[in-house]
Amino acid sequence: MAELLEKISAVDRISNIFDANQTMVGEGLPAWVNQARTPALQAFQKMGIPSFRTENYKYSDLTRLFENENFRRSFKPDLFDVDLAEVFSCDVPEFDTHLILVANGWYDEKSTNSELFPKGVIIKSLRKAMLENADLVEAYYGKLAKSNEDPLTAINTIFAQDGVFIYIPDNVQITKPLQIINILRSEDDLFVTQRNMIIAGKNSQAKIMLCDHTLTSQQFINSNITEVKIGEDAVVDIYSIQNQHNKTASFSGIYVSQDKGSTLSTNAMTLHGGIIRNNLKISLDGEHASASISGLALTDKNQHVDNYTSIEHLKPNCVSNQLYKNILDDSSTGAFTGRIHVSPYATKTAAYQRNNNVLLTDAAKMNTKPQLVIDNDDVKCSHGATVGRINDEALFYLQARGINEKEARLMLMFAFAHEVLAEVKIDKLRDVIDELVNKRLRGEVSLCHSCALDCIR
Amino acid sequence: MLVIKDLYAKVEGKDILKGINLTVNAGEVHAIMGPNGSGKSTLANVLAGHTNFEVTHGTATFNGKDIFEMSADVRAKEGLFLSFQYPVEIPGVSMVNFLKTAVNEHRKYRNQKELSAGDFLKLMREKKEMVQIDSQLTNRSVNEGFSGGEKKKNEIFQMAMLEPTLAILDETDSGLDIDALRIVSNGVNMLKNKNNATILVTHYQRLLDYIVPDFVHVLYEGRIVKSAGKELAIELEEKGYDWIKKEVEG
């Protein structure tokens, strides 16, 4: 009985955690960062934990997850006995990246060699940038990822302390990809908050990879929000590889604002993870901006992957192109919601969206929902969604040529997935991901206690 | 080589084959003709191992082995080849990868070493020339965006690559213009030798001007109702199928 009485709501518990740790959370950070926490908390209390009643979370009810968690919070950096850079030395031939390590949401200074970064480029802990580059950070912090629009963004803003800050000055092109590796490692169940910001100046170029991993088998909840500002004519690629174990709940939000003539490519590759929700919001806020957005999720067991995209066409002559695919095995579930809004001013908009899914079992389930809001006559828009099975006729065709059923199925699944991989523009990375997907489909990439990119060794 | 005895099969609960008897020996070409819906394609698919078709009675042995005990891929590796009436498009699976896998699966089955990439490409070049397939086609996904004629030529090209002992050509001629028909027939004739056999499933006599059969069988309502030499095909072309129907029903 006593236990029942003591049980409090997840909203109250999260509020209490903030109240009790407010000083520690805000310590050493400028006032404008800490001042954002209280309105975020109020917004969160108003919206509550996302459930099937929450407008944009219809297919991902997180009530149970949040009600049952009483995880430790990483309000201070955890000390590790190993050199993380050593663990993650990526020796894929010809795949050379600038490595940035984040452990339990904290930027890992000692593993990141900032001397090797190109001149003028700022890559540092977001925490440091909030103090040293306040003018840059303050201009966008909380402006792209708005706490009052999304409960998970609100939770992130309440507790945000650190993450990665990347600033690429005007006219600087970084050729080597920047690889941010997010590591979760803990002896007890852990709730991690990470906040990042990427600012790409006018006519700059960068390719950024986000790799998510778990190093220990504890349960994790990982809230990871990235705000991205892409300047005029800049070209930015963001690739993410999610390969966390299945006791992890991962909530990522990427919020982008694009200026005139800029180009963005994103690719979200989900290999492993328990409950995954990826929010991607892109505002095309300058003429002739274009965004190419893609994602692939390969799920099995009881995994749940929910991709939510929201594309705001605010100015004329912009293009957005979306392609998301899922292959769902066992009892796994998936969801895709693709919202496209074309504003009255965004004439000559071209917005395309496609979501194709393959269910391998009767128990697997996929929900897909296009949401087009078009306040303009002068647009080209299309959307299409399919949920199907492996094509039996194609399977028989391959078998009739001597290819056994298992191999034939793999060939067809790989072919289905490959269309998404073709969107990855870094040749070597595409090859690596190709191989990873191949192995994942064969069940060979299970829990990889290491960088996913090391799996092909 | 192939011995079919009293074969019955159904598809979606409907009896299609009702007692087929057929023996095919090495070096022979058999034509199976018949009106639409007589069961010609069903017979071809049953032999190749399509799971939509259920064998309810009878036997079929291929080189002495019971083919109904083998999955479709094993039948293929034993040397049975079906040229599809409607080859399916498989986007994303490249012709090269598909053929390389198929050829090497055959080789593994025969305990031969897998072909190296170089040897495979050489083999592919040779066979392409032999069957006169447009070399661009092998740079694409399997059958994707191929014209009707290209799909049929691609079937014959695959046959050349896999060198089956028994080829079943299901309506390979339908929808082909005269040039494509000539190329396809040339390919089949070139691949023919005293150790292999061919079954031509066709509605029209036209194909048999190019590939001359040793035997012509007429399939009607799930049974072979008439067998003769190549002259039967000419008779069918002139008189149609009605006289056969009358003969059977009368």
Image (tube, grey):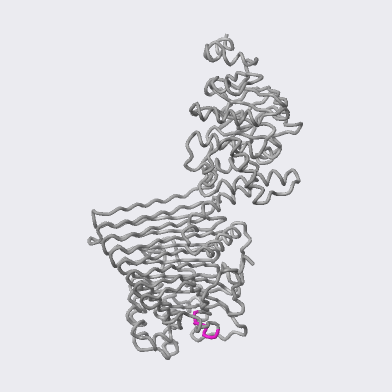
**Can you name the residue that lies furthest to the top here?**
B250
Q: Is residue A107 magenta?
A: yes
Q: Where is residue A457 shown, x and y percent of the image?
A: 64, 67
The part of the image, by quadrant, that contains residue B20 is top right
Q: Where is residue A294 shown, x and y percent of the image?
A: 44, 60
| Residue situated in front as seen by the camera: A368 or A103 | A103
Q: Where is residue A283 shown, x and y percent of the image?
A: 32, 67
When the figure is inspected, residue A305 is found, relative to residue B34, above or below; the finding is below
The part of the image, by quadrant, that contains residue A320 is bottom left
| Residue situated in front as seen by the camera: B243 or A26 | B243
| Residue situated in front as seen by the camera: B157 or A341 | B157
Q: Is residue A339 left or right of residue A116?
A: left
**Residue drawn at the location 59% of the way across and 80% of the way down:** A84
Q: Is residue B4 left or right of residue A136?
A: right
| Res B230 visible | yes
Q: Is residue B125 magenta?
A: no
| Residue situated in front as seen by the camera: A82 or A285 | A285
When the figure is inspected, residue A48 is found, relative to residue A111, above or below; the finding is above
**Residue drawn at the location 49% of the way across and 72% of the way down:** A176
Residue range of the region highlighted in magenta in the rendering: A105-110
When the figure is inspected, residue B206 is found, relative to residue A318, above or below; the finding is above
